[in-house]
Amino acid sequence: MRKKIAIGMIVAVACLFFAGGIYAKVGDMIKIAGKDCPSTKGEIQFSHKKHSEDYAKQYPDLYAKGCSECHHDAKGQPIKDLKADSKVDACIACHKKCGEAPKGKDAPKLDKKAKLEFLAEAYHDNCITCHKDFNKKYAPKKAPVTCNDCHPKKS
């Protein structure tokens, strides 16, 4: 009997480790560091708790859709009924191209959907759009909207 319980526990722990590798478990501070897509800018320290709890309580009108304000499915539609412990795919699961969309006079003209294939464009669209909305509505304008506000300079 003890042997069956021990094997069951080992299998359960192995399943937890396996599942943890597939889905990102949300902690308080998330490092957006470019592990899969190296960045030319500094690592971003993002406080999920500050956004999902503190700001959501303080500014409920900006978080009307709850977690789905930021999290969406592969078609860009809000994911309904998300909770703090829900499992979601990492952004790179859909936004597979590293970096930003090509820019400049020789760059191809891309529509929004094509631009959002780039991971940095997806982050910028999601984060900066919300930050600009915040700054339009609330004073002082404290939500970061420039590169150096979010990306610390590399040392």
Image (spheres, helix red, strand yellow):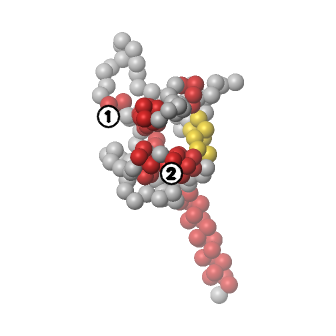
- Give x and y (percent) for residue 154: 65, 25
> Callout 2, which amino acid?
Lys
Tell me the tag on residue 88: none
Say which residue label 1 marks.
Answer: 113
- Give x and y (percent) for residue 80: 37, 56
Say which residue label 2 marks.
Answer: 57
73 horizontally vs 37: left or right? left
The quarter of the rendered structure image containing the N terminus is bottom right
Asked whether residue 148 is in view, the answer is: yes
152 horizontally vs 70: left or right? right
The quarter of the rendered structure image containing the C terminus is top right
> Callout 1, which amino acid?
Lys
Label 1 sits on a secondary structure element that is: helix
How far apart marks 1 and 2 lie (CA) works out to 32 Å
- Residue at image location 42% in from the left, 31% down from the top: 136
- Residue at image location 50% in from the left, 51% down from the top: 57
Q: Nearer the viewer, residue 38 or 134?
A: 134
Which tag, 1 or 2, sits closer to the chain's start?
2
- Residue at image location 39% in from the left, 50% down from the top: 64
